Amino acid sequence: MTSMKASELFDISGRVALVTGASSGLGTRFAELLAVNGAAVGLVARRGERLAGVASRIKAAGGRAVAVEADVCDRDAMTRAFDGVEAQFGTVTILINNAGIAHADRAVDMAEMQWRRVLSTDLDAVFFWAQEAARRMLAAGTGGAIVNIASVLGFGVAKGVAAYATAKAGVVQLTKALGLELAFKGIRVNAIAPGWFMTDLNREYLTSEAGDKLRREIPVGRFGEDGDLDGALLLLVSDAGRFIVGATIVVDGGQMVALRG
Ligand SMILES: NC(=O)c1ccc[n+]([C@@H]2O[C@H](COP(=O)([O-])OP(=O)(O)OC[C@H]3O[C@@H](n4cnc5c(N)ncnc54)[C@H](OP(=O)(O)O)[C@@H]3O)[C@@H](O)[C@H]2O)c1
């Protein structure tokens, strides 16, 4: 087989993507990246107005997008979201399971409701949206790619993140389990584990003194910035990543490999 140019290898034009948590932060970036590379994109989150803004920007830039308001923890809303995107663009063949919340609390203080809220958003919903996407890809015989957004906190921990870190570790393991079961059907499931990126999720913390200390511990000397996850995402959703299954790609500026000392 002759070697391909990168533009062909990473080509996703004509595919249909659904991005959860597309109303802010990393999810908005993922949606815009997929659209600018030719995919039609379904945008999902609870804040409809913000989603509509992202959809307009994508369309103004010549892309295709539809906004569907949904809470990822609501199974009926999930079905409606897939139906809505499918009605506009056809079967979803790329799912980015990105919606997530963080909650910081010492384990002994954590209320049951907070534990359940984090686990249901950051882990349960990842499973149910992947399951729904896979069922539809199987029925349509399309194959596809599912990318779950994990975290470096799925591998290491810090104080105050018991629920979040447990959910993200679950995402890493779930990615392997789904990858194993679906690979034969042409559906690849992988994950990205970002390090620290300043978004609404953590702005307060990262701009504090503790955040300064964190930044100094990152080998590249800065937090993640817009665009730092683009390469990993495009790799996992395109044919460039066609033999990558069940993997979690860590994109963290070297944070996880650095020894303290
Ligand atoms: N930023 C980082 O440093 C970092 C590092 C590692 C991993 N991550 C992961 O990256 C993902 C995106 O986070 P971010 O940093 O971009 O945070 P963000 O700016 O707060 O974005 C989170 C997104 O998730 C959506 N969301 C939250 N709960 C939802 C629900 N129940 N239903 C539907 N949508 C929901 C939010 O939209 P609505 O509020 O409009 O619903 C928002 O669009 C998360 O999974 C996070 O854990 C982030």
Image (cartoon, rainbow, N blue to C red):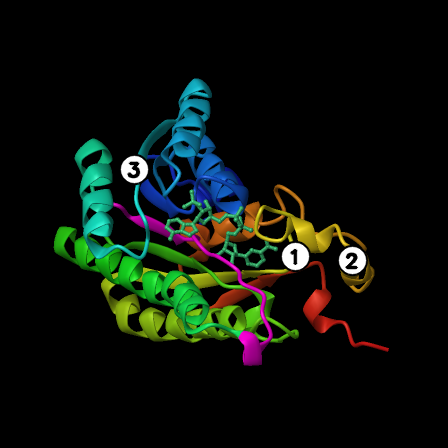
Q: Position of residue 25 (x, y in %)?
A: 54, 43
Q: Residue placed at 49% from the left, 39% from the top?
A: 28
| Label 1 residue near ligand 1, CB within 8 Å | yes
Q: Quadrant of the C terminus?
A: bottom right
- According to the picture, the residue beneath numbered tag 1 turns out to be 196
Numbered circle sitting on residue 68: 3
Circle 2 SS class = helix
Residue 73 appears at what percent x and percent y?
Answer: 31, 57
In terms of depth relative to the viewer, which is nearer, 218 or 182?
A: 218
User: Which label's residue is closer to the chain start, 1 or 3?
Assistant: 3
Q: Position of residue 89 (x, y in %)?
A: 23, 34
Numbered range of the magenta stretch: 92-109
Report the side of 212 relative to 172 (left or right).
Answer: right
Instruction: Tally the numbered discs.
Output: 3
Residue drawn at x 71%, y 65% as measured from the top left? 255
Residue 233 in view here: yes
Give the label on residue 259, or none. Answer: none
Residue on which the image places disc 2: 215
Q: Tell me, yes or no, whether the two marked residues, 1 and 2, touch with CB atoms within 8 Å.
A: yes
Whether residue 14 appears in magenta in the rendering, the answer is no
Disc 3 marks a residue whose amino acid type is Val
Which residue lies most toward the top here? 60
User: Viewer-proximal residue, 184 or 109?
Assistant: 109
Closer to the camera in the image, 119 or 156: 119
For label 2, being within 8 Å of ligand 1 is answered: no
